[in-house]
Amino acid sequence: MNSIKNRVQLIGHLGNDPEVKELEGGKKLAKLSIATNETYKNGKGEKVENTHWHNLVAWGKTAELAEKYLKKGSEITIDGKLQSRKWEDKEGNNRYITEVVVNEFLMMDKKN
């Protein structure tokens, strides 16, 4: 049961091309965003659609594969874990972000 304590699975479309950086030692980091949609009917019976944006990061081989195969608009399924971090901006303000660290992804687009 320990393996499912911090697990996230999402299906959605990429909002941008992966932003890939090569770090010291040659390790790669990819930053992406994914949009997920949910649809429901409100109390008046009207259809309501909500879009949620999620920040993703991928490391190493996963980042290399994202750089090679993914592009804005791609539909993907991801499996990962939540991670929160804090940093100080140029003005000295504390900033916080919660991201999904991608363990693996599956491309859902149909082949042409």
Image: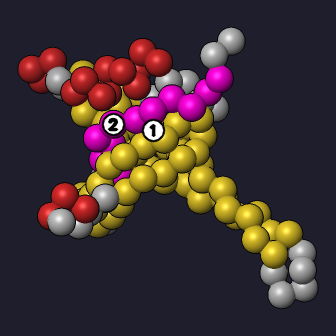
Work out whether residue 93 or residue 11 is closer to the camera in this orientation and state it.
11
> Up-down: is 75 above or below 97?
above
- Element type at mark 1: strand
Whole-percent x, y for residue 67 in the image: 40, 20
Asked whether the viewer can see residue 3, the reply is yes
Image colouring? secondary structure
Q: Magenta includes 104?
A: yes
Residue 95, located in which quarter of the rendered image?
A: bottom left
Q: Residue furthest bottom?
A: 43
The residue identified by callout 2 is: 104
Task: List x then y, in percent, for residue 94.
Answer: 29, 66
- Magenta-colored span: 99-110
Image quarter of residue 21: top left
Task: Name which residue type carries label 2.
Answer: Glu
In front of the other: 78 or 35: 78
Q: Residue furthest top?
A: 112
Label 2's element? strand
In-front residue for pair 23/42: 42
Q: Label 2 crowding class (10 Å Cα cut-off): few <14, some 14-19, many 20+?
A: some
Q: Is residue 8 left or right of residue 59?
A: right
Sooner in the amino-acid sequence: mark 2 or mark 1: 1
Compared to residue 94, the image places residue 79 above or below, namely above
Question: Please, what is the three-letter code of the amino acid marked with disc 1?
Answer: Leu
Q: How many marks?
A: 2
Residue 46 lies in what quarter of the image? bottom right
Q: Position of residue 34 (x, y in %)?
A: 53, 45
Instruction: State the predominant SS element of the stretch in magenta.
Output: strand
Q: CA distance from mark 2 to mark 1?
A: 13 Å
On screen, residue 54 above or below 71: below
* Residue holding disc 1: 32
